[in-house]
Image (cartoon, helix red, strand yellow):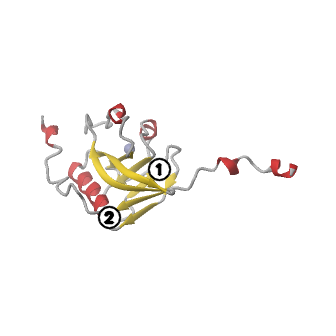
Amino acid sequence: MGKLLNLPFQLDAMPQALTIQIPSNILEAIYAGAKELYPRESFLLLRGNKNKGAISITDLILAPFAIHGEGEVHFNPYMFSGDLSLVGTVHSHPSGNISPSHTDLNYFFGRVLMIVGYPYEGHTCIAAYDSNADKIPIEITAPLACRDEDFYEEDFYEEEDL
Ligand SMILES: [Zn+2]
C-alpha cells in the first residue's frame, strides 16, 4: 500500500475534462455580431447548462455597461452574481489571433472564456479556454430553437453613436 504514496499528486489534481457544446446558430449569431462591430471588439455573456463535463451554450446576453471602444471591453460582473446560468463570456479579436490576452485572463468571468477571431467564419475562428488559459474542446451542435430569434435584428449597438 505504501507504494501508492509515490504516485505523483498531479494525478489527483487533474482538472475534470470539459467540453463546450455550442449550437451552430448561436455561433453564427456570435460571428454576425463580431462582423457588425469589426474592427472593434464585440462582447457577450454566455448562458448555458452544465451536464456531465459538458457545458451547453443556450443563450447570448448583451452585457450591460459594455463599452465597445478603442481599448478593452468592460462590464460589471457583480450585476450577475445571482444568475447561476451564466457560464462565461465571448468576445471577438479583430486581429484574428484567438489566443487570450493577459487582460482577458485577468477579467475571466464564469467557467469559460470564448474568443472568436477575424474573419469570423467556419470552425477554426473560435476557441474556448478555462481560467488557466487551457483550451477547452468545442463541439458545434445542431441549431437550437431560439426563443429570441430577432436578437441581432434589433439595433443593440445603436448607443455607440451617442
Ligand atoms: Zn481578448
Amino acid residing under circle 1: Tyr
Which residue carries the number 1 mark?
129
Side of 146 relative to 115 (left or right)? left
Beta carbon at label 2 within 8 Å of ligand 1? no
Which residue carries the number 2 mark?
24
Q: Nearer the viewer, residue 151 or 91?
A: 151
What's the CA distance linking mark 1 and mark 2? 19 Å
Q: Is residue 120 at least partly visible in the picture?
A: no
Q: In the picture shown, does residue 11 fall above or below 83?
A: below
Q: Position of residue 124 (x, y in %)?
A: 39, 62
Residue at disc 1, secondary structure: strand
N-terminal label among 1 and 2 = 2
Question: For the C terminus, which image quadrant?
Answer: top left
Amino acid residing under circle 2: Ser
Q: Position of residue 81 (x, y in %)?
A: 38, 34
Residue at disc 2, secondary structure: helix
Ligand 1 resides in the quarter of the picture at top left
Q: In the picture shown, does residue 27 fall above or below 8?
A: below
Which numbered circle lies on residue 71? none
Q: Residue at x 40, y 53 (%)?
A: 49
Q: Quadrant of residue 108?
A: top left
